[in-house]
C-alpha cells in the first residue's frame, strides 16, 4: 500500500522557509549559521518537536530529528539536505530536501504509519560553502574516513575550521560553530553503526525533467568530472605604443584556445557531455596594458571515464601549441569518478515512483551533493524534483508545491520499502 504526503503542509513549509533570508526580490540569501539560517533551523526544530521527534546536534552543527520505530535495536534511516543557500539563491535548493524529510516524518506521525526503523530528518551544515568555502564542507568532514584519497585532502577538519568568511576575510568557520546554539556532540554525527542508509531529495537544477514532461527524477549517479586550469604566459606592453604583430597577448591567445576547445570537444559528438569555462583570471587587468598572464578553468562532466579521457587529451594538447605567440601550461586541479547510488535503494525509489503514478524518469546528477560523500560511508540514493526552466542558484529558481509534494510522497514510500528490508 502506498501513502501520500500533504500538499497543504508542504505549501505551508515552503512559504514559511522562504521568509528566512528573503532578499526582497523572490529569493533568499541564507548563509550557513547566519541569523537567517538559524531561523530556518529553529523552524525545523519547532515542527519536528511538535510531532514528538527527538532532536540532536553534532559537533559540526548538523541537526537530527528522529521518530523512534517499533524495533529499538534497528538502525536509523536518514533523509537529509541543507538549509543554507548561495548569495541571492532560490527557495528550493537544499531546503526542499529538508522540508521533504520533515514532511515524511509529519506524514508518518499524522497517519500513524507503522515502521520498524527510527526515521531521521537531518540538516547538513554548510553545503554551499558560500560563506565559508569549500562546498560540501561538513559532509566532507563527517564522511572523511571513507572518502577517496584525492578528495580527502581537501576536507581536513583542522583546515576546515580555519576557513575564513568571504564577507569579512577574517572570522572563521570555527568561530561560527563556537557561537551557534546548534553545536552538539561529536558522537551524534551520522555514522555506520547507528544509521542504515540515506536518502536525499533535491531540485533537479536542470531542464531535463521539464522538457520531458516528467515530475520526478530517479537519480542513478553523480557524474564523474575533471577540473583543469590552462595558464597563458606572454608579455605586458603599452596598448598605444606597441605594434600588433610583435605582441604576445595572453587574452587573445586564451580566447583562441577556448574556441579551439569547443570545436574539438564538440567533434566528439556526445550531447550529454558538458564542459564549462566559468573562471578567468587576467593580469594586469588594466585597459592600457596588453595582458601578460591569463588563466582559465575547464570543468568537464560525463558518466563515462573513457569519454572524459578523450576530452582530457584535447585539453592537455593545448600545452603543445602556441596561442597568439604565448606559451600555455595545463594543470590538473582535481577530478572525481562517477559515483553510482546504491542499487537496492535506487530500486525502492523507482518502484515508489512507478506506484505513485507520477510521470518520472531515470536521470544522472550533474551537480555534487552531500549524498555523494555519504555514499562512501553507507547505502545512499537521491530523488529529483522538476525545476522550472532548469534554473537554480538564482532567485527565479522554482518548483511547484505539487511537484515538491510528489517528490516527498515518493521519498516516503521508498523509505517505507527500505524500512521493511
Ligand atoms: Zn543543494
Image (cartoon, grey):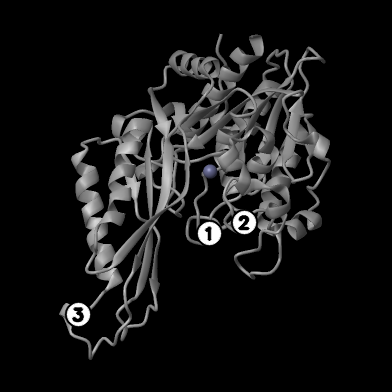
- Residue 31, numbered circle: 2
Q: How many marks?
A: 3
Q: Position of residue 29 (x, y in %)?
A: 56, 58
Relative horizontal placement of residue 223, taking residue 193 as reference (left or right): left
Q: Quadrant of residue 133?
A: bottom right
Q: Nearer the viewer, residue 103 or 79?
A: 79
Q: CA distance from mark 2 to mark 1?
A: 7 Å
Dividing the image into 4 quarters, which one contains the N terminus?
top right
- Residue 246, numbered circle: 3
Q: For mark 1, what is the residue? A: 87
Q: Position of residue 248 (x, y in %)?
A: 26, 74
Relative horizontal placement of residue 302, taking residue 84 as reference (left or right): left
Label 1 Cα crowd, 10 Å radius (few <14 / some 14-19 / many 20+)? some
Give the structural element (helix, strand or loop) at label 1.
loop
Mark nearer the viewer, 2 or 3: 3
Which numbered disc flags the more N-terminal residue, 2 or 1? 2
Amino acid at each position: 500500500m502506498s501513502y501520500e504526503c500533504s500538499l497543504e503542509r508542504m505549501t505551508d513549509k515552503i512559504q514559511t522557509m522562504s521568509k528566512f533570508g528573503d532578499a526582497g526580490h523572490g529569493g533568499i540569501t541564507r548563509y550557513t549559521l547566519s541569523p537567517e539560517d538559524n531561523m530556518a533551523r529553529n523552524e525545523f526544530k519547532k515542527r519536528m518537536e511538535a510531532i514528538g521527534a527527538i532532536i540532536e546536534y553534532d559537533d559540526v552543527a548538523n541537526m537530527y530529528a528522529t521518530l523512534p520505530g517499533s524495533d529499538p535495536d534497528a538502525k536509523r534511516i536518514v533523509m537529509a539536505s541543507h538549509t543554507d543557500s548561495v548569495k541571492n539563491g532560490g527557495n528550493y535548493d537544499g531546503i526542499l530536501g529538508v522540508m521533504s524529510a520533515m514532511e515524511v516524518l509529519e506524514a508518518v506521525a499524522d497517519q500513524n504509519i507503522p515502521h520498524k526503523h527510527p526515521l531521521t530528518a537531518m540538516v547538513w551544515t554548510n553545503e554551499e560553502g558560500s560563506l565559508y568555502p569549500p562546498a560540501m564542507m561538513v559532509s566532507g568532514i563527517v564522511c572523511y574516513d571513507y572518502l577517496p584519497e584525492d578528495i580527502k585532502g581537501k576536507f581536513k577538519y583542522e583546515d576546515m575550521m580555519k576557513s575564513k568568511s568571504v564577507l569579512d576575510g577574517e572570522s572563521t568557520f570555527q568561530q561560527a560553530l563556537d557561537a551557534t546554539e546548534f553545536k552538539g556532540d561529536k558522537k551524534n554525527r551520522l555514522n555506520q553503526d547507528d544509521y542504515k542508509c540515506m536518502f536525499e531529495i533535491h531540485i533537479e537544477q536542470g531542464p531535463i525533467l521539464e522538457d520531458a514532461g516528467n515530475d520526478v527524477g530517479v537519480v542513478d549517479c553523480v557524474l564523474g568530472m575533471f577540473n583543469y586550469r590552462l595558464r597563458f604566459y606572454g608579455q605586458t606592453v603599452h596598448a598605444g605604443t606597441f605594434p600588433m604583430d610583435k605582441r604576445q597577448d595572453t587574452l587573445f591567445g586564451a580566447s583562441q584556445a577556448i574556441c579551439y576547445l569547443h570545436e574539438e570537444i564538440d567533434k566528439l559528438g556526445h550531447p550529454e557531455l558538458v564542459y564549462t569555462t566559468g573562471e578567468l583570471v587576467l593580469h594586469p587587468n588594466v585597459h592600457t596594458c596588453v595582458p601578460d598572464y591569463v588563466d582559465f578553468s575547464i570543468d568537464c562532466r560525463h558518466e563515462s571515464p573513457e569519454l572524459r579521457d578523450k576530452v582530457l587529451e584535447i585539453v592537455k594538447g593545448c600545452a603543445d601549441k602556441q596561442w597568439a605567440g604565448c606559451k600555455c601550461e595545463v594543470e590538473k586541479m582535481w577530478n572525481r569518478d562517477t559515483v553510482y547510488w546504491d542499487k537496492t535503494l535506487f530500486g525502492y525509489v523507482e518502484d515508489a515512483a512507478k506506484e505513485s503514478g507520477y510521470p518520472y524518469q531515470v536521470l544522472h546528477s550533474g551537480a555534487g551533493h552531500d549524498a555523494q560523500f555519504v555514499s562512501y560511508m553507507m547505502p545512499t540514493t537521491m530523488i529529483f524534483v522538476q525545476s522550472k526552466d532548469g534554473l537554480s542558484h538564482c532567485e527565479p529558481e522554482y518548483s511547484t508545491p505539487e511537484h515538491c509534494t510528489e517528490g516527498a510522497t515518493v521519498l516516503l514510500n521508498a523509505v517505507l520499502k527500505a524500512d521493511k528490508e
